Image (cartoon, rainbow, N blue to C red):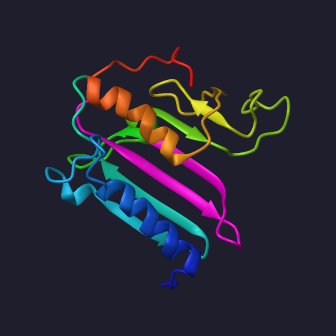
Amino acid sequence: MHIPNQHQIRRLGYIASLFEDTSSSIFEKVKYPSVVYIQPKGRNKIKAAFPLIDHVIYGETILSISEKLDESGSIIQYHYGWEESQRVRAKGKQVRHIMAFGNENHRPGSSGWVETNPFHHHHVPGEPKQRKSTAVQTLEEVIQILQTYICTGKHYDSSHNF
């Protein structure tokens, strides 16, 4: 097993603090403790999953976090997804996908290319390969967006733009 480096430890602590923050009203901190997952992966990655308060339409969901850090600890690649939980039963990536944000780079003219490349919004529930342009670039922005849906029970529609 790889021992986490100082940048992974720092980032893991920061992400954990977002979950533990009592002012955040989207995280379910009591009902689904078995879903909480936060750990380093390899030499430069972070993986995390945090349960969200049950959504009126989608039920039990999670915020999935995947980040890749460079040698100085800066985030060079990320994927932040709102997904249906797999606590009760395993689900495929497409089935559990509601929406996500990422910054994987794509070549102009490729199917993954959007005007705001590398920043994109995986906007179609059940179809994570679908992308459109977005201004969203941080985990904090994603949490803010999810707060709108989780706290109000608002239905997410792929036509919503961020």
**Which quadrant of the structure image shows residue 35?**
bottom left
Question: Does the magenta portion include 63?
Answer: yes
Question: Does the magenta portion include 94?
Answer: no
Residue 7 in view, yes or no: yes
**Which quadrant of the structure image shows residue 15?**
bottom left
Residue at x 65%, y 54% (from the top left corner): 77
Percent coordinates x, y for residue 154 in the rendering? 32, 19
Most distant residue in the front direction = 23
105 vs 160, nearest the viewer: 160
Residue at x 85%, y 28% (from the top left corner): 109
Instruction: State left or right for residue 31 relative to residue 36.
Output: left
Residue 41 in view, yes or no: no
Percent coordinates x, y for residue 62 in the rendering? 33, 44
Q: Which residues are magenta?
A: 58-81
16 vs 105, nearest the viewer: 16
Instruction: State left or right for residue 109 relative to residue 15.
Output: right
Residue at x 70%, y 72% (from the top left corner): 72
Q: Is residue 105 above or below residue 74?
A: above
32 vs 12, nearest the viewer: 12
Q: Quadrant of the C terminus?
A: top right
Instruction: State left or right for residue 100 relative to residue 51.
Output: right
